[in-house]
Amino acid sequence: MKTSNVFHNKSNAMRLTYCGMLIGLSAVGAMIKVSGSIAFDSMPGFFAALFLGPVEGAIVASLGHLLTAATSGFPMTLPMHIFLVIEMGLIAYLFGAIYKKRGGIVASVIAIVLNGPVGTLIAVPLSIIFGLPFSGWALFSALIVPLTLASAANVLLALLVFKALNKRMS
């Protein structure tokens, strides 16, 4: 359940290098769209939350969503995407923190639920407040399935890669 001890002995320069590489992978994932601004950008952020720590995971996940929104043309407006950047960072942070205390299954379920159904539910009133043309329950209906499936894929892939890498490094 712990992050690799081998990694935590690395210098700050090495940690920054890993962050930069994972942000680069988020940029690649941002180009693999599921629907609109839903993409495979958050997998590196969730991985970073496990491998580097919750704070680094939050940074990578936040920038990953920003890259996806930018490459999609900010389809839900800049203010809405700024909120989503903050939300992604918080979810990745919680994923890393919960993993340390409760393990992969609990952390994964919570991250998927927060990023999928809960995130979509929060978007309903915000979309109305921000005056999005496609808003409210219509937005919820259109996003719930693709966002939840993409969340599950991103979270579970991050966990699998982390476990495989951790096993190999031990």
Image (cartoon, helix red, strand yellow):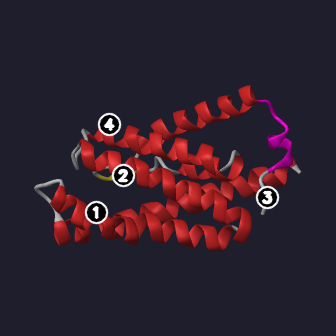
* Label 3, residues with CA under 10 Å away: few <14, some 14-19, many ≥20: few
Q: Amino acid at mark 2?
A: Leu
The percent coordinates of residue 41 (x first, y second) are 46, 46
Q: Are marks 4 and 2 in contact (CB under 8 Å)?
A: no
What residue sits right under mark 4 in the picture? 71
Amino acid found under the numbered disc labelled 3: Lys
Which residue bears the numbered disc 3? 2
Q: Position of residue 142 (x, y in %)?
A: 24, 66
Residue at image coords 82%, 55%: 167
Say which residue label 2 marks: 84
Look at label 1 and name its amino acid. Ala
Which of the 4 image quadrants contains residue 17?
top right
The residue where tag 1 is placed is 123
How far apart are labels 2 and 3 at the CA level? Answer: 28 Å
Residue 56 point in image, percent of width and height: 61, 43
- Compare marks 3 and 1 and give the one earlier in the sequence: 3
Q: Is residue 165 above or below residue 94?
A: above
Q: Which residues are magenta?
A: 4-11
Q: Earlier in the sequence, mark 2 or mark 3?
A: 3
Indicate yes or no whether the magenta region holds residue 6: yes
* Residue 80 against residue 115 in the figure, above or below: above
Decide which of tag 4 and tag 2 comes sooner along the chain.
4
